[in-house]
Amino acid sequence: MDLQKLLDPFPIKKEAELVAQSIAKDPKHVNQLWEWCISNEKHSWRATWLMDKVYDVDPNLVRPYIPKMIALIPTLENESKQRQYLKLISCEPLPKDISGEFINRCFDLLITATTAIAVKVHAMQILYNFSIIEPDIKNELALILEEQMEHGTAGFCARAKKLLKALR
């Protein structure tokens, strides 16, 4: 399967879902997809989007890559890849040995004004998930969420309110 040809030009959602189903039927392609995700190819972010679609079909195929995604986040600058990786990470329980560097990066993404809202929302969810493991960050996270809500979008504020309620 030539993933690059399938993802260039950019497929519509329905086409991506069909490709994801095809990959799920033949899981050997998941590693090929991951290799393209981490490449520096011009449109490799499309592979991360497809990885999300594969997760929707069969999360077990993507779970082995979650620790690799966590390891990439602290230095990853591509916003599209950040969004997809953080979304996938937020759907899974965090490993007990999660790095402080990763958690700090999530805080940085949450408080940086120029971070895309979707990235902020996924970082917020991950930090909430982490607060279940490390309750010491609950107060800090609550304060940051309240502060960020002052300038947040409706979607951001809705998620923040939900998490604030759970934090208290």
Image (tube, rainbow, N blue to C red):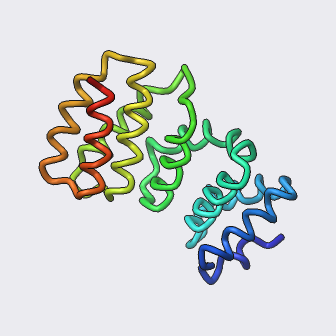
Query: Which residue is painted at 23% across and 23% down in the image?
Result: 139
Question: Can you give x and y, in whole percent of width and height, for residue 25 in the image?
Answer: 85, 58
Q: Is residue 147 left or right of residue 18?
A: left
Q: Residue furthest bottom?
A: 9
21 vs 9, nearest the viewer? 21
Where's the N terminus, which quadrant? bottom right
Question: Can you give x and y, in whole percent of width and height, for residue 130 in the image?
Answer: 43, 27
Question: Can you give x and y, in whole percent of width and height, for residue 19 in the image?
Answer: 74, 69
Query: Which residue is painted at 31% across and 16% down in the image?
Result: 136
Query: Which residue is painted at 31% across and 37% down in the image?
Result: 107
43 vs 144, nearest the viewer? 144
Vertical arrangement, residue 14 with respect to residue 115, above or below? below
Q: Is residue 125 left or right of residue 52?
A: left
- Which image quarter: residue 9? bottom right
Q: Is residue 90 left or right of residue 44?
A: left
Where's the C terminus, which quadrant? top left
Q: How many marks?
A: 0
Vertical arrangement, residue 129 with respect to residue 159, above or below? above
Query: Which residue is painted at 32% across and 46% down in the image?
Result: 159
Q: Is residue 92 left or right of residue 33?
A: left
Question: Can you give x and y, in whole percent of width and height, for residue 55 in the image?
Answer: 66, 51
